[in-house]
Amino acid sequence: MFGDYFSRALIAGIGLALVAGPLGCFVVWRRMAYFGDTMAHSALLGVALSIILSMNMTLGVFAVAALVAGALIVLQRQATLSTDALLGILSHSTLAVGLVLVGFLTTVRIDLMGFLFGDILAVSVEDIVIIYGGGVAILAILILAWRPLLASTVSPELAEAEGLRPEASRLVLMILMASVIAIAMKLVGVLLITSLLIIPAATARRLSATPEMMAVVAAVLGAIAVVGGLFGSRTWDTASGPSIVVMALVIFLLSLTVPVTRLFGRRETHGA
Amino acid sequence: MNAVVPRDILITLANAGVTRGGRTLVSGVDLTIARGEIVTLIGPNGSGKSTTAKLATGVLKPTTGTVTRQPGLKIGYVPQKLSIDWTLPLTVERLMTLTGRHAPADIDAALEAVGARRLLKAAVQELSGGEFQRVLFARAMIRKPDLLVLDEPVQGVDFSGEVALYELVRQIRDTTRSGILMISHDLHVVMAETDTVICLNGHVCCRGTPSAVKRSPEYLKLFGERAAHTLAIYEHHHDHEHHDDGCVVPEGHEHGHDGHDHEGHSHVR
């Protein structure tokens, strides 16, 4: 079944979506969309550095994304510029530095478009192993740390007062995001990674009554977007990464037409 | 009752203070909370109420003095303000297990106790201010905490809601025998059941029972003459069965020995 490039793309894409959906919920809940974008943009710098240092690219991207997250935390403590401005600086400067560094790499020819927009059809069996290995690890950590992660998302003060550690939760989330970015970059590219985190999660919101349900629905919707997008790109011969994002957008728009009959969150009309 | 049962002290702050980045947030706080006691912290914004509460809960470590907590102390926390974003789908039922697992029967019982049983399946975003506050009380209580920390519990609740919440606090104290630490921004209303009121303004300005604090010169200095006329003590109908015990400090006593002088401080911010 790993024989042809199309099934490999499907398997890889679905694997990514199953991880990106639940993690994306936290990105939406904690309003970290721009933060995720910034980490994703730094991935190109990670690519350039891992080629220069001739190290594993996934590890290089992960390390740079995690460093950028750490840098942001340090800069936030200085409290001179707003987080918004800091993100803007980090986001575009890491992307620009990455692009400049890639330009210096004369010994290796790298497919810049592939890194910016992804090349899911070029996924190898080895990539699939990385996606599923990393994906299982990310989901396992997410499930194990779910309660403290959610509690500190709802209220850091409350979580802290009742003996949880919101700062640690924040760190865990950043590391998980850096990991997802590292495994997703090859598939959808640095410019489109955050869309796979955010769009399925945002779509799932209207269809869910609890955080857990939203995480599962987001994973499923993400997988549907991957399958639909890939088949669409084959049918109409469109770029595969962007097609997946367009499919996710279509599902999001469809979800808006679902009438807001309150399926969930109804009060009991009888009783105490 | 207090006379027979020895005070089961949950938390002791001894001369505790926090200095951060060269700025003293609060200093020289002496405070004990025993099981079944209600301690209320009052003071203006930035006076160190929250810092003191964080010292008590262990979120902050004291830079001076000591904080001693009973080993294994379980804390329930009712936050000052909790706005839950629409993007996070959360029912009351799910909110109840936010920081720990609880059986459905316990969840029902806790909500029943605050009169919010019918809200079980409701989304938290559609609750009214008073309903949400009750649910947050239930959430903190379900943990069967030794110490309940209430951070400005009546903020944004209208007067009748406020009276109902104080009634609820009294009930909680009577039924669970938890110690209760209440932070109040409202300088004018203090529960009559409060065993000790502590006025803070970077340090302890005055302390005692609500009626003693109301008369203390430090309170008047801190909040002005007008405040004395408006300090309403919310009294329950069978109020003052308990007598003013040893923690009532006559003016000058606890103030004398810690050596700070009030002339040296500016209370005007």
Image (cartoon, rainbow, N blue to C red):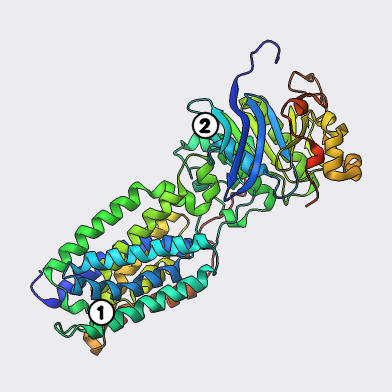
Q: Report the amino acid beneath label 1.
A: Phe
Judging by the rendered image, the residue that carries numbered circle 1 is A115
Judging by the rendered image, the residue that carries numbered circle 2 is B74
Q: Badge 1: few (under 14), some or many (20 or more) residues near its Cα, within 10 Å? A: some
Q: Do the residues indicated by labels 1 and 2 lie within the same chain of the protein?
A: no
Residue mark closest to the camera, 1 vs 2: 1
Q: Chain of mark 1?
A: A
Snapshot quadrant of residue A139: bottom left
Q: Is residue B130 above or below residue A74?
A: above
Side of A54 relative to B126 (left or right): left
Q: Secondary structure at mark 2?
A: loop
Q: Chain of mark 2?
A: B
Q: Between residue A155 and residue A255, name the one nearer to us.
A: A155
Residue A247, how many percent across, how many down? 34, 78
In this rendering, the count of numbered labels is: 2
Q: Secondary structure at mark 1?
A: helix
